[in-house]
Amino acid sequence: MRTQAIAGPTATAVSLVMLGALLTPVQAAYPERPVRVIVGLAPGGGTDTIARIMTQKLTEAFGQSFVIDNRPSSGGNIAGEMLARAQPDGYTLLVITPTHVVNGSLFTDIRYNVVRDFTGVVNMVYSQYALSVRTSVPAHTVAEFIALAKTTPQKLLYASSGIGTANHLSAELFKSMAGIDLTHVPYKGSAPAVNALLSGEVQALFSSLGGLIPHVRAGRLRTLGVTGPRRTPTAPEIPTIAEAGVPGFEVSGWYGLAATAKTPAATIERLNAAVNKSLPDLRERYAGIGADTAGGTAAEFNAYLKSETEKWARVVKLSGAKVE
């Protein structure tokens, strides 16, 4: 039996498809080697812990090591610069936090731009900050604290862990939205700031809820509200600041994964899917350190990074904070 040759337009189309297949390099499934995950803070801290919980899951999911690379220097800027200079292949990732979007407005000499040089993979978790006061302060609600501040402008002192830090800028945003004037007292770290509140050196503080809860439950401090978009399962009895007196107020200490700009979309999608799949299994572990799981699409996270960059640029400008 004779086989008839394919002729005409069909033959031409088949030939072109075959030629294209020969000329197109075969892409190996990502990842085919270990992935470096940069953390801009020292080992053992909250950001490092959040990162290690997730990288363990990603290592299991992909069968390749996701290795933490701690670069605790220059307020996270060294870590940000490393990601911006990395090859856009998905083998260098960054645990991105609000610090990176704030730094673009805060530092006068910075060598990366979050919106231009990064592409968001996914928001992994977020944590709540809280507005707390000494129990001697005659305010039991956010509304009462605002009323007190309006009758005593600049006399209420609030602590922060340093100029330009998340809790400093959270307070500045609160001041501007509530129409009040508080006096900033910066300290060198969150522990000294909390101690200043406990000792009576200052009257108020925005800080991570997890570190304040023991003092609140012991009756040493009073928490008036949390800063996130909804109440936290860690302390559901505490209202959000938005519902308690300042509509629209929202600050979250979020922790996401970012890759270098122009990383292939297929790689971003694989990472995004793996993180989203892992989050339900990690909910209790993250809750144990005061964090709530997030998740979502890469597009949603990139839109969030852009909006956060713009929001904090306005707050930094209002505060007048700059780091040379």
Image (cartoon, rainbow, N blue to C red):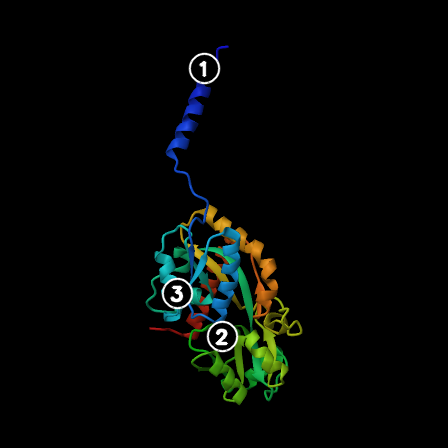
* Amino acid, disc 3: Gly
Q: Residue at x 36, y 70 (%)?
A: 74
Nearest-to-viewer mark from 3 and 1: 1
Q: Nearer the viewer, residue 179 or 257?
A: 257
Q: Residue furthest right?
A: 237
Q: From the viewer's perspective, tell me whether residue 178 is left or right of residue 28.
A: right
Residue beneath label 2, please?
167
Name the residue that disc number 1 marks.
Answer: 5
Work out how far the residue at label 2 is from the one at label 1, CA to CA, in angstroms: 75 Å
- Left or right: 324, with 131 as reference point: left
Where is residue 278? Give x, y as percent. 57, 56
Mark 3 secondary-structure assignment = helix
Q: Position of residue 54 (x, y in %)?
A: 52, 60
* Alpha-carbon span between mark 2 and mark 3: 17 Å
- Dot 2: element: helix
The amino acid type, in three-letter code, at marker 1 is Ala
Residue linked to disc 3? 104
Judged from the image, the secondary structure of the residue bearing numbered disc 1 is: loop
- Classed neighbour count for the residue bearing mark 3: other residues with Cα under 10 Å, few (<14), some (14–19), many (≥20): many
